[in-house]
Image (cartoon, coloured by chain):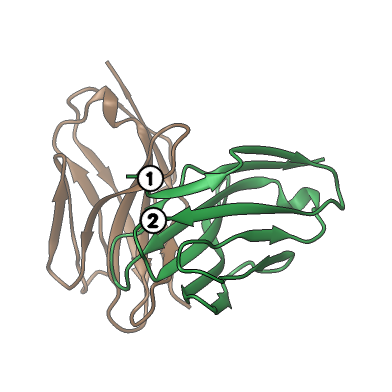
Amino acid sequence: NAGVTQTPKFQVLKTGQSMTLQCAQDMNHEYMSWYRQDPGMGLRLIHYSVGAGITDQGEVPNGYNVSRSTTEDFPLRLLSAAPSQTSVYFCASSFRGGEAFFGQGTRLTVV
Amino acid sequence: GDSVTQMEGPVTLSEEAFLTINCTYTATGYPSLFWYVQYPGEGLQLLLKATKADDKGSNKGFEATYRKETTSFHLEKGSVQVSDSAVYFCALGEDNTDKLIFGTGTRLQVFP
């Protein structure tokens, strides 16, 4: 079982560049979310989706966009990268009220 | 809003020692509580969960009891192993949503 697949695993961007972090799940989960992990901060919710066509903001949404055109995919877009967005990004999916499954993470460095 | 507070690490133990990692929460409604574990270079995976007051979650020798009166969900293990070295996250599942609110994580280092 693939579970939750994130690509790429590592990325270096220059300030001002844009990019898309990909996330796909094959478990038919309704709920998908993006978190960033920073030292001493735990995981903070960026955006989430409760189903195809429905997205909402989490705790730290500024500088990020998402869309959910299919149940399987939930890409995260960085519009204009900033050094403050250097972090490890995790995508997760779950059924409503169920266990969250996480991807392996994307380590992003913005220089 | 809802929040989770867990003890800062790192926690350093010798093999076979007793482990406690404290976690307290603030929430409205009736949240579910979780412990997730992150091994080096990997994503998070569920360790155990409890969905209502007085429930005890357990897995791989770890256990935690949902204490509504003290708003706590402390993680315990009677005898840790080197392979338990990881970062442990306490999390709260908001009532009526699927949002997970995480604590800051506690790094556990177990030495032989």
In the depicted structure, whether residue A23 falls above or below residue B33 = above
Between A48 and A51, the one lying in front of the other is A51
- In this structure image, what is the colour of chain B? brown
Give the alpha-carbon distance from disc 2 to disc 1, as whole Å: 7 Å
Which residue matches tag 2?
A26
Q: Identify residue type, mark 1.
A: Ala
Let me know if marks 2 and 1 both belong to one chain.
yes
Of helix, strand and loop, which one carries label 1? loop
Name the residue at 63% across, 60% down.
Answer: A76
Chain letter for the residue marked with disc 1 in the picture = A
Residue wearing tag 1: A2
Q: Position of residue A13 (x, y in %)?
A: 79, 42
Q: In the rendered view, does B93 fall on the left or right side of A15?
A: left
Local secondary structure at mark 2: loop
Q: Earlier in the sequence, mark 2 or mark 1?
A: 1
The furthest residue to the top: B112
Identify the image quadrant of the C terminus of chain A: top right
**Amino acid found under the numbered disc labelled 2:** Asp
User: Does residue B48 lie above or below B16 as drawn?
Assistant: below
Q: Is residue B20 left or right of residue B79?
A: right
* Picture coordinates of residue A53, whole percent (x, y): 54, 79
Q: Nearer the viewer, residue A3 or B92?
A: A3
Do the residues bearing badges 2 and 1 touch, measured as CB atoms within 8 Å? Answer: yes
Farthest front residue? A70
